[in-house]
């Protein structure tokens, strides 16, 4: 038997559809402790005896719990019982944490970068993402927020660097440093990439909340108010802002109280926006840069 095939010729590569079924049935985390960063474990039967990959015989275990099973410290029976009643399903979420540094974290949203900024996203009076100072000397900065969607509810909640993904979602996948949340097939609503010790990148987002929208990818990012006012960011960096992006009923504000900020007349805002990779739509004069 090779490293990749068992004695029945079965590859260790589990089909993506089966992986998704396993994630869904486990609530997107370790069935024993609920940790979101987990591994696929064949338990009924063991991989060595398996002739096919069936979701009902595969579960999720975090590295620590998996190691206890592999070493024989925990039994397969324990895994089987936990798989019948996964802790993530019982408590409603999988849980893990970001490694945030002792220096102010850097936040990227698509192509836009925010440095030394306290409130990253504020939508319709709801703080979606913010950074709080350390609780004490020698402690890290604290990232908190709620990524909510009108269709899915609270998809991802971050509380002082600890994040929780709802077990009621269609799919939550953790691959390497990337957390991807899907509303349905081929419909990613949020993709976060951890940059340990430095910050977090939102590489893809597609959320609607009380009529406002946040959507984009690595190339562009758009924020849209319920009345249609919109700002689209391309390559862009801002530092020392009080608020990075704020959306209310009739306007979108980018770069509130930044080190370089001031209040612009609309025509000047357009010129400044273009120089910074912003796109403002002239037909809606309630869009300002650097308020």
Image (cartoon, rainbow, N blue to C red):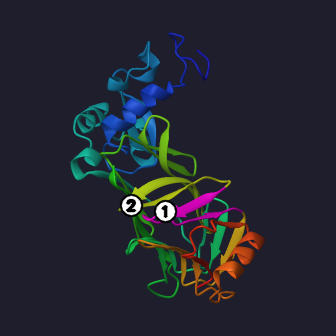
Labels 1 and 2 touching (C-beta < 8 A): no
Give the number of the disc on residue 211.
2
Q: What x and y, as percent, mark residue 2?
A: 62, 18
- Residue at which label 1 appears: 228
Compared with 183, 197 (above or below) is below
Q: Is residue 216 visible?
A: yes
Q: If the image is split into quadrants, where does the C terminus sit?
A: bottom right
Left or right, residue 265 beside residue 253: right
- Foreground of the two, 108 or 251: 251
Q: Residue at x 38, y 32 (%)?
A: 22
Using the numbered discs, state the Cα–Cα distance from disc 1 to disc 2 in whole angstroms: 9 Å
- Foreground of the two, 251 or 143: 251
- Foreground of the two, 104 or 126: 126
Q: If the image is split into quadrants, where does the N terminus sit?
A: top right
Q: What stretch is highlighted in magenta?
A: 220-234
Q: Can residue 59 be seen in this view?
A: no
Residue lying furthest top: 8
Q: Quadrant of residue 111?
A: bottom right
């Amino acid at each position: 038997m090779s490293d990749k095939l068992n004695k029945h010729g079965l590859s260790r590569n589990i089909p993506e559809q089966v992986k998704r079924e396993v994630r869904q049935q486990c609530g997107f985390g370790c069935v024993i402790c609920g940790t979101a960063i987990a591994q696929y474990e064949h338990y009924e039967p063991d991989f060595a005896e398996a002739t096919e990959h069936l979701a009902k015989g595969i579960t999720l275990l975090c590295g620590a719990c998996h190691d206890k099973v592999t070493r024989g410290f925990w039994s397969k029976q324990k895994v089987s019982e936990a798989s019948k009643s996964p802790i993530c399903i019982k408590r409603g979420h999988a849980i893990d944490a970001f490694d945030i540094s002792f220096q102010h974290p850097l936040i990227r949203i698509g192509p836009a970068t925010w440095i030394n900024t306290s409130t990253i996203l504020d939508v319709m009076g709801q703080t979606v993402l913010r950074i709080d100072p350390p609780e004490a000397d020698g402690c890290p900065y604290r990232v908190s927020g709620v990524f909510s969607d009108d269709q899915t509810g609270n998809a991802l909640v971050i509380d002082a660097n600890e994040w929780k993904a709802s077990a009621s979602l269609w799919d939550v996948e953790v691959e390497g440093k990337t957390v991807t949340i899907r509303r349905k097939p081929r419909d990613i609503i949020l993709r976060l990439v951890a940059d340990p010790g430095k910050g977090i990148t939102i590489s893809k987002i597609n959320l609607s909340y009380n009529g406002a929208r946040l959507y984009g990818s690595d190339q562009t990012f758009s924020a849209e108010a319920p009345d249609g006012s919109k700002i689209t960011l391309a390559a862009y960096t801002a530092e020392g802002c009080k608020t990075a992006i704020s959306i209310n009923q009739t306007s979108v504000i980018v770069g509130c109280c930044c080190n370089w900020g001031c209040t612009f007349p609309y025509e000047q805002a357009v010129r400044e926006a273009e120089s910074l990779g912003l796109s403002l739509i002239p037909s809606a004069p309630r869009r300002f840069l650097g308020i």
